[in-house]
């Protein structure tokens, strides 16, 4: 509440939050048995609407101590991003987090913390990796970040496997609904709300890392769903991803408060006359194969190819 008191809040709002957090207790139900109530004296109340806001306020003063390191916080997760040149600061950073947690009446749960090391393709397997910064922190080859599986090879293969396994289990639910007499159009609506939502969730962030084999697996699954009558036969994964990219790009373009809006600075004034563009932003240039997998770079490349494939009346070719 000390950090909450530093915010500019009306007295009635502050008093309501204080009353909500004080004398708050919880219990656990398992196998039909309910534990006794225990008062919550620290952390964020899970499942409450105040949870994310409380976490943001509480973790606002958790900042990196070394230049180049980044602390990313979202919902109730915290990610420490340390570049290779600062690898020697890992132990100090973990100690800093432990100290911050202790000062805020919290405790770092090392068993729930994981470390993942990303290495370039030419260095994989050629050099020994440093030991984890804490013996209680486990090093993993893949990590689930906001439901997206990220591996240390920066490929989408593991995420596609997890995605297809989840979608395959939903096919059984659709079969049950069909057996109970649900109509074909309603089945398609359920399919679109569930499986299409899963396939396109955060698609601009991960589909650029898909290999040709990953696309083949996704297209094969979609064709299977079309044969079962759940999806349209004309639907393709590539078109769904392109629509998701286009929708996200429009949101970034027209929302100045969007987190990715800073990656699209205004273009300099052009004195010569060209075809009117749909935006006036300077787009990111490709610098490496990894950069090409970035959403904005890959989306721009796809849009440029679409523009160049359409002949103009004057025979000129324009790009974004």
Image (cartoon, rainbow, N blue to C red):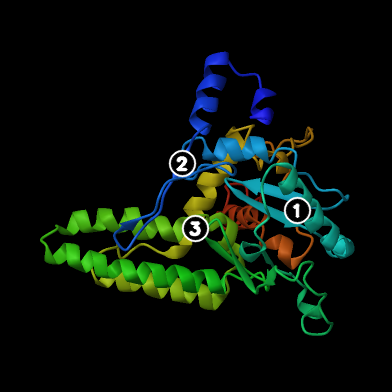
Please determine whether, in this image, residue 140 is positioned above or below residue 251: below
Mark 1 lies on residue: 98
Mark 2 lies on residue: 25
Which mark is first along the chain, 3 or 2? 2
| Mark pair 3, 1: CA separation | 41 Å
Q: Residues within 10 Å of mark 1 (few under 14, many from 20)?
A: some
Mark 3 lies on residue: 241
Label 3 near label 2: C-beta < 8 Å? no
Which mark is first along the chain, 1 or 2? 2
Residue 71 position in % (x across, y down): 74, 49
| Mark pair 2, 3: CA separation | 44 Å
Q: Secondary structure at mark 3?
A: helix
Residue 257 position in % (x across, y down): 63, 32
Label 1 near label 2: C-beta < 8 Å? no
| Mark pair 2, 1: CA separation | 25 Å
Of residue 148 and residue 199, the one placed in the foreground of this image is 148
Give the farthest residue toward the front.
Answer: 36
User: Can you tell which quarter of the image residue 288 is in?
Assistant: bottom right
């Amino acid at each position: 509440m000390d950090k909450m008191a530093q915010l500019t809040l009306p007295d009635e709002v502050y008093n309501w939050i204080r009353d909500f957090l004080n004398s708050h207790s919880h219990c656990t139900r398992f196998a039909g048995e309910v534990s006794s109530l225990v008062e919550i004296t620290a952390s964020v109340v899970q499942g409450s609407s105040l949870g994310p806001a409380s976490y943001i306020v509480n973790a606002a003063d958790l900042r990196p101590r070394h230049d180049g390191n980044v602390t990313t916080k979202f919902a109730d997760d915290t990610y420490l991003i340390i570049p290779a040149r600062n690898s020697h600061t890992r132990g100090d950073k973990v100690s800093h987090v432990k100290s911050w947690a202790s000062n805020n009446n919290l405790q770092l749960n090392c068993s729930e913390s994981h470390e993942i090391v990303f290495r370039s393709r030419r260095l994989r397997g050629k050099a020994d990796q440093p030991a984890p910064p804490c013996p209680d922190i486990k090093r993993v080859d893949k990590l689930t970040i906001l439901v997206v599986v990220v591996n240390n090879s920066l490929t989408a293969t593991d995420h596609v496997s997890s995605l297809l396994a989840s979608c395959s289990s939903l096919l059984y639910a659709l079969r049950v609904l069909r057996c109970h007499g649900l109509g074909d159009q309603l089945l398609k609506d359920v399919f679109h709300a569930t499986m299409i939502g899963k396939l396109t969730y955060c698609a601009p962030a991960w589909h650029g890392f898909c290999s040709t084999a990953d696309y083949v697996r996704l297209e094969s699954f979609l064709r299977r769903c079309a044969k079962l009558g759940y999806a349209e036969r004309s639907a393709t994964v590539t078109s769904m991803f392109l629509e998701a990219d286009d929708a996200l790009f429009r949101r970034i373009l027209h929302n100045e408060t969007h987190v990715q809006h800073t990656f699209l600075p205004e273009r300099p004034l052009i004195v010569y006359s060209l075809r009117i563009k749909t935006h006036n932003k300077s787009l990111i240039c490709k610098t490496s194969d990894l950069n090409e997998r970035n959403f904005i770079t890959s989306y721009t490349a796809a849009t440029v190819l679409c523009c160049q494939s359409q002949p103009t009346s004057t025979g000129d070719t324009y790009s974004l």
